[in-house]
Image (spheres, rainbow, N blue to C red):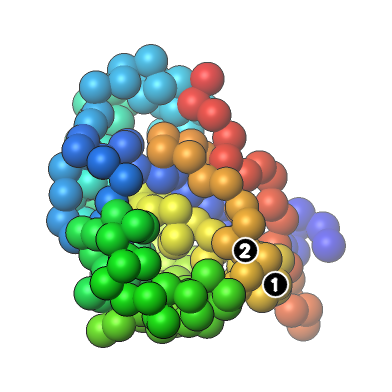
Amino acid sequence: MSGETSEITRWWWLRHAPVADRRGRIFGQMDVDADVSDMCALEGLASRLPHDALWITSPLKRAHQTAAALAKVMGHDAEPLVELNFAEQDFGLWQGFTHDEMAQQFPRENELFWKMPGSALPPQGESFTQVIDRVGRAVETLSRDYIQKERIVFAHGGVIRAALALALDCGPEQALGFAVDNLSMTRINRLVAPGKPIQWCINGVNLGAV
């Protein structure tokens, strides 16, 4: 596949800064604050990111706060695009619980979840398989609809694992095996050539900021 005939979209996936008050709880789509005080990590990310990129955030506050903190470091003043499909997995009734509390309150559902974490459905929530589906739809749309070749996305561990599942064409359980740290970067390229299927190139996973 030659560079002259290929269309390349480069995705820079950033997991948000750590939640300010973690205490081992499951946050999912709860709208909680991020701790963006780690200037060393933010400056490290800024030194590696492209400046001519489309910025995209999850609708959740912790992603927005991380984007705003990094924008200040980079001198980036454009308002990021908000993509609803890049929200973290909805854990339904489990949100706000610790893992121990979840096991006590929902013993059967908890047991099933740990047996099949990719397909199990949290009470009144969504499965990781459903996250992969919605992230995939957004990635395809956002890869086509903008001039810039670079996309910087401020998202969540589950969303970034979903992007890796798409790139690797692997099952949800395999994708959940990836570590995705706060303020880490995952690099994935999407390549399209005439008459050929979409190809993916993973340049790095869970890359540190420095």
Q: Amino acid at mark 2?
A: Ala
Residue that mark 2 sits on: 175
Q: In this view of the protein, can residue 152 be seen by the observer?
A: no
| Tag 1–tag 2 contact (CB < 8 Å) | yes
Q: Residue furthest top?
A: 40
- Residue beneath label 1, please? 170
Position of the N terminus, as image quadrant, is bottom right
Percent of width and height locating residue 4:
75, 57
- Residue closest to the eye, 201 or 117: 117
Residue at 54 percent of width and 60 percent of height: 161
Left or right of 194? Residue 161 is left
Quarter of image, res 203? top right
Disc 1 element: loop
Residue shown at 62% from the left, 44% from the top = 205
Instruction: Tell which residue pokes out farthest to the right in this image.
Output: 1
Rate crowding at label 1 as few (under 14), some (14 to 19) or many (20 or more) other CA atoms within 10 Å.
few
Instruction: Identify which residue, 88 or 100, lies in the foreground.
Output: 100
**Coordinates of residue 200 in the picture (x, y in percent):** 70, 62
- Asked whether residue 95 is in view, the answer is yes
Q: Nearer the viewer, residue 10 or 108?
A: 108
Quadrant of the rendered image containing residue 192: bottom right
Amino acid type, residue under disc 1 in the picture: Cys
In primary-sequence order, the first of circles 1 and 2 is 1
- As drawn, the label of residue 64 is none
What's the residue at 41%, 38% (across, down)? 182
Distance CA(mark 1)–CA(mark 2): 7 Å
**Helix, strand or loop status at disc 2:** helix
Does residue 62 appear to the left or right of 184 in the view shown? left
Using a 10 Å C-alpha cutoff, classify the residue at mark 2 as few (fewer than 14 neighbours), some (14 to 19) or many (20 or more).
Answer: many
When the figure is inspected, residue 151 is found, relative to residue 197, above or below; the finding is: above
